[in-house]
Structure formats: structure tokens, C-alpha cells
Image (cartoon, rainbow, N blue to C red):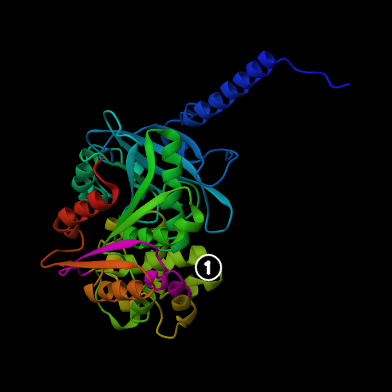
Amino acid sequence: MKRRIPGRLVLTLLVVVAAGALAGVALAKHPAAPVKGPSGIKFYSPSKLPAGPHGTLIWARPLRGSAALAHATNDTVLYKQVGVKGKPVAVSGIVSVPRGTPPKGGWPVITFAHGTTGIASACAPSRDTGPSSGAHGADLSVAPLLNTWIKDGYAVVRTDYEGLGGPGVHPYLIGRSEGDGVLDIVRAARQLAPTLSNRVVISGHSQGGHAALWAASLAPSYTPDLHVLGTVAFAPESHTAQQASLLRSVSSTSLTGLAAMILRGVSVAYPRLNINALLTPQAAALYPQTLTKCLDQLDQPNSLGGLPLNQLVTQNADLTPVIKDLALNDPDNLKIKGKVLIEQGLADTTVLPPFDQQLSQELAHNGAKVTYHTYAGATHTGVLTAAAKDATAFLRTHLGKG
């Protein structure tokens, strides 16, 4: 015989179930407090990684020093990412959240990828905690722009990239590694600061422009939980493979340190290349410095900056495999959904304007909605100032006012 449950009891059960469901929602919105990371360099090397998907926050600690942004709460974070070898790794970065009351829906987020600082772990912007910049001038050159964005009500998150700060060797200009790091730090930041929205604009300068474009192409499949509303790339590195084919024809010393870093980066992703066998004896003696010195130090006359570019690799070295693998990481073949703004200084001697003009055309051909701006007289770092107004207008159009 069926037993009839009194209506009042049914109502009570429904209330209990509903309350439990609401409690679950509340818990989802207010996660447990993040773990406070250890002091010193121990912060960057956890003994084990926590469970959870890519973008899981490992721990955090307050950040002070030259890398901190004004009018914001700044934290150094460590989070999980799938590394260049296909296994989870710990990656560091910086999360800067505006002070004050967040807007409805949370602070919009700009994930900004920094320009080249070096490959050595000490070159990570989050490790630059002194009162002024030494090895990380590129990080300071962008500080005025990032501070403006904080004042406008945008949270700014900045990955150090895989192997910079954290364990391993940085796979410099390897697109997948960079792009994943740029996206995963947003996930980690939203665990640290639940006041952050999932509305995101991706941005970056130089190496970071390269990283930003890769992140934009990866976002729909890699982080579908993030609502990416556009991409701003300042002087993005492109056509690296094409330029590598000219190594033996340039006698200048100004880019030798950068070229050696490119070789180091591609060797991290593709060890079979055996880069050491391609180097001249003079370059081979200096090449280990890419693992210990930052870019400004590598550019000195007593380092790779004293070696002409055409003496980096031997005259009979077969660069074909290197060029092929570099081409896999160039952004010119990427398919990006959404709007892309490329900002290029016409006085740039590091990322040459014709390459980025070509890049903008190639991305547009692949389906992106690209706007290409140039700035007369603007150098490689000067474009960050020259293009600041246009970049900020782009943010306000696509992210709204924070």
C-alpha cells in the first residue's frame, strides 16, 4: 500500500532542498580563501601541484615594488598551466585589481602580456620587486598605460610566461605556451578575486603582442568560460621564421642577444633541433648566458651584444628545421574570432613595420576583423605612449567603462 506524504512535509522538504541549492550557489560565488604562498623564491617552486584544471590558482601573496600598479591591490600569483611538454606546470604572474567598489557584473579584465625581458627566471616581471627597474625596463615602460587602465576601472593581470619565474626554461616565442599562460592567469585571478568579471580584452607588447594574438586564437576552445571581446597588440613579433633565414646576412650586433634567445626558445619546444651544433665557437661560449642574464645584459659588448649577428651560427649550418619550427609559432596563420587592433611605430627597429603590416593583412584574410594603426616617429617602446589613446578607446568601446 502506498503511503501518502502530508502536503506540509512536502513543502518543508522543498524549502530545505531549495536552501541547500542556494547555499551551493553562494559557495560557488564565495570560494575558500586562497592559499598564501611562501616568501622568497620558494614561492615559484611548489613541491606538488594541486588538483584541478588548467588555470587553477596554486597560491598568492601581496606584491610590492616596481611591478606593482598604482591605485590597485597587487598580488603575485602561481597557477597551473599545460606546459610546452604537455604536462601541468606552475606559472607565475601578477594580478592588479582596482581599489573601490566593483561595477555590476564585476571588474572587466585586461590580460596583458609583457615584452621581452629575457629567458632566465630572474627576468620575470613579478620578481622585479625593487624600488626601480633594473633588468625589466620593458615592464616599466608600459606602467603608465596600465595605471591608466586601472584608473579607468579595469583589472589588469600579467603572466610571467611558462619558465619565467616558475620552474623550467622559458620557451620564448612558442605560441601555444604563451597563449595558454595569458588565458590561464585570468582563470586564476578570478579565483583570487571573485569581483572580477569574465569579460576580457587580451593585450600585449612585442613578445607579448605575439602572445596576445595566440591567446585570442586559442580562447574559444581553451577557455570557453571567458568572454573575450577583443585584442590589442602593440608591435607584435611576427614572421620570425622569415627573419631567421637572414641570420647570416646581417652584421649588426644590436639583435644578436634577441636572436640567441629565439634559438634557445625554439630548442626548449623542439630539443631534436640540437641548436648547440649550429653555433659558431664564439657564440657557443656565450650561449649559456641566455639562461642566466636578462636581455639588457645580453645586449652588452661583453656578452652577445659584442657578437655580429652573422657570427651566431656557422656558415654551413642547416637552418631549415629551425625555420620550419619557428614558422609553426608565427602568428600570421592564426584564425582569430573577433576584433583585433594592431598598433605599430614607424620608427621601430626591433619589430619592423612592413612585417606587422603584412601580419594585419594575413590575419584579416584568415577572418579576423583587423584595424592597423601606425604612428610616425614612434619607436618599439614608444608605441606604448603614442598608441595609448587609441588602445584605451578600443577598450572602452568593447569592455565598456569599468
Closer to the camera in the image, 181 or 120? 181
- Looking at the rendering, in which quadrant would you find the N terminus? top right
- Residue 351 in percent (x, y) is at 26, 69
Quick one: SS at disc 1?
loop
Q: Residue at x 48, y 51 (%)?
A: 223
Classify residue 174 as left or right of residue 66. right
Closer to the camera in the image, 317 or 178? 178
Q: Residue at x 26, y 28 (%)?
A: 100
**Residue that badge 1 annotates:** 270
Inspect the image, locate mark 1, and give the three-letter code of the amino acid beneath it.
Tyr
Closer to the camera in the image, 387 or 46? 387
- Residue 168 in percent (x, y) is at 50, 52
Task: Tell me the quarter of the picture where residue 354 sits.
Answer: bottom left
Residue 179 seen in the figure: yes
Number of numbered labels in the structure image:
1
- Looking at the rendering, in which quadrant would you find the C terminus? top left
Highlighted range, magenta: 325-349
Is 179 part of what is drawn in magenta? Answer: no
